Image: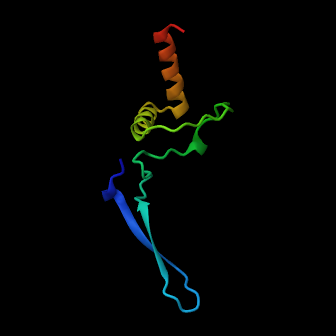
Amino acid sequence: MIDTAKLAETILELPSTSGEVPIKCYTPLAKANNETTTGHLKRDGRTAQKTHRTLAFATRVTPIFDHDIRAIAENEGLKLVEVLEKAIEVYKEKQGY
């Protein structure tokens, strides 16, 4: 869940034409401490090692799942895909695949 106390607000004034009143847009901004609006730390993927994984895998998850998997990955120093791979290994062992 987003902690609204950590959000700042900025006002952007769009230029007006022919003497109209400027339009003001209110935009929430996350604090600049390398934290995203979902509350997890943002890792710089460009510095991660090449993994030679070439197939894209995208899915929608709950915010709790997202928080949990990112916390595990960050604590263990793993990529998200590595956490999923380990989970699949454990599942296969448990189910007898």
Left/right placement of residue 59 relative to residue 2 reads: right
Q: Nearer the viewer, residue 25 or 55?
A: 25
Residue 23 lies, with reference to residue 19, above or below; the image says above
Q: Residue furthest bottom?
A: 19
Q: Residue furthest left?
A: 5
Residue 21 lies, with reference to residue 10, above or below; the image says below
Q: Nearer the viewer, residue 21 or 86?
A: 21
Coordinates of residue 69 in the picture (x, y in percent): 44, 33
Coordinates of residue 7 in the picture (x, y in percent): 36, 60
Q: Is residue 80 at least partly visible in the picture?
A: yes
**Colour treatment of the image:** rainbow
Q: Is residue 79 at least partly visible in the picture?
A: no
Left/right placement of residue 18 relative to residue 11 reads: right
Give the total number of marks visible in the rendering: 0
Q: Nearer the viewer, residue 40 or 21?
A: 21
Left/right placement of residue 97 relative to residue 75 reads: right
Point 47% across, 33% down: residue: 77
Q: Quadrant of the C terminus?
A: top right
Point 57% across, 43% down: residue: 45
Point 52% across, 89% down: residue: 20
Left/right placement of residue 17 relative to residue 24 reads: right
Residue 38 lies, with reference to residue 32, above or below; the image says above
Coordinates of residue 18 in the picture (x, y in percent): 58, 91
